[in-house]
Image (tube, grey):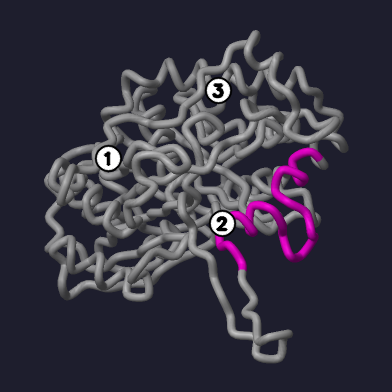
Amino acid sequence: MRYDDAAVPLGALWSSPFAKWQGTLAETSSLDLAAAVTTRALADRALDPAELAGLVLGWTVPAPDVFYGAPTLAARLGMPGVTGPMVSQACATSVAALHAAALTGGPQLVVATDRTSNGPTLSWPAPARQGGAPVTSHWVLDAFARDPGTGEGMLATGETVAAESGFTRDEADAVAVLRSEQYVAGLASQHRYLVPVAIPGRRSAVELAADEGVRPVDAGTAAKLPPATPEGIHTFASQTHPADGCAGAVVTSVDHARSRGGGVVRLVASGFARVAPAHMPQAPVPAARAALADAGWGFGDLHAVTTHNPFAVNDLYLARETGIALEDMNVRGCSLVFGHPQGPTGLRSIAELVETLVDRGGGRGLFTGCAAGDTGAALVVEVDT
C-alpha cells in the first residue's frame, strides 16, 4: 500500500540493545522495558509526549497486563488521554505497526516490544479429557517448533528452500561471516539509534548498554560448526537466536516532520505477501516487489537494503531473485547477528536502514523480512536529509 502523507522525523526511530535468550532482560516485563526505553528515547530526542495523538503497540509474546497494554503504556509515558491499536503479526509486527500508524491521523507513537525469554505456558480447560486434564502449550517454544498449517518448524522451511534452490553450506557460512563483519563495522554508529536500558529495581537496576549474545563469526569458526539438522546447510552461526528488546518510532505527516527542523524519512509504501507452504524464506521477495510496485520503484532504484534474515538462506534467495549483491544488504549487520525479539526486530533494521541512507546523503531504501506462516512484510522509505 502506498502512503500519501506519512513520515518520521529524522532521528525519531530507535531501538534498545537486544539481550540474549535468558539473559539480562529475561525477568523484565516487556511492558516495563517499553516504558523505560520509550521514555528515554522521547526525552533524548526532545519529543513531547503531549503532542502525540495515538499509540500503536506491537507485541507477539504475552506479558503481564498486556490486555491493557496500549492505554497502560500510554499513561506511563505521560499520555493519559491516548490509546490506540495493538498489533501482533509475528516477525512482521514492526511493519504492520508502522502501517497502522501511517493510516491514522495525527502524530502517532509506535512501540514494539517483546521478551521471548520465559514465554508463558497456556492452559485451557478440557473437562472431557481423561481426568479433566487441561490442554497446554508453550507460547514461544511450540511456535518455534511447528507451524500448525504445515507441521513444519521454521528451520525446516529454511532447509527446504536451501535444498530446492541448490544453496550450499559454504554459501551459508559465507553469509554468516559477511554479516558478522558488517555488524562489527557498524558498531561505531549504533549510538545514533540505540537507547540504553536502565530500569530501577528494589535490589539492583536492570541495565543494558550494548547487544548481548552476539557471536563473532569468522571463516574458521563457521566451518567447524556442526549443522543444526542432519544434511542441513545452517549452523548456529547462520541462523538467528531468540532475544529480548524494544524499538520505537514517531509517525506523522511530512509537513509536521519537517517542522522539527531536520530531515524527513518518508514512509512511501508497504507490502505483504505469502508463499507456498513451508517456504517462509522466500516470502521477503514478493513482499518487497509489492511495496516497490506501489511506490513506483524497482530494485535498481534503491540506495540501501536491510533484511530480517533468521536464516542465511533468506539473503541468498533474495540476492538471487533480485540481483542485489549480498554485500550491499545489511551493511550495519542484521538480525542474523544481533538476534530476534520478534516484534521490535523490523523496527531496529528500519532504523539502521535510515542511518545508512543518512550516511549516503539520503535516498531510497527497502526493508524486507519473513514472518511465521510463510509470510513476508516490506517497507520502502525515502530519506531527505
Q: Please tell me which of labels 3 and 1 falls first in the chain.
A: 1
Check residue 140 in the rendering and tell me which mark sits there, or answer none.
2
* Mark 3: few/some/many CA within 10 Å (<14, 14-19, 20+): many
What amino acid type is highlighted by mark number 1? Leu
Give the structural element (helix, strand or loop) at label 2: loop
Q: Please tell me which of labels 2 and 1 falls first in the chain.
A: 1
Give the structural element (helix, strand or loop) at label 3: helix
In the picture of the structure, the residue carrying the numbered disc 3 is 179
* Mark 1: few/some/many CA within 10 Å (<14, 14-19, 20+): many
- Identify the residue shown where x is 49% and y is 19%: 182
What amino acid type is highlighted by mark number 3? Arg
Quadrant in the picture for residue 326: top right
Question: Is residue 280 in sight in this rendering?
Answer: yes
Quadrant in the picture for residue 189: top left
Quadrant in the picture for residue 23: top left
Question: Is residue 259 in sight in this rendering?
Answer: no
- Identify the residue shown where x is 72% and y is 30%: 234
Q: Position of residue 373 (x, y in %)?
A: 68, 59
In the picture of the structure, the residue carrying the numbered disc 1 is 10
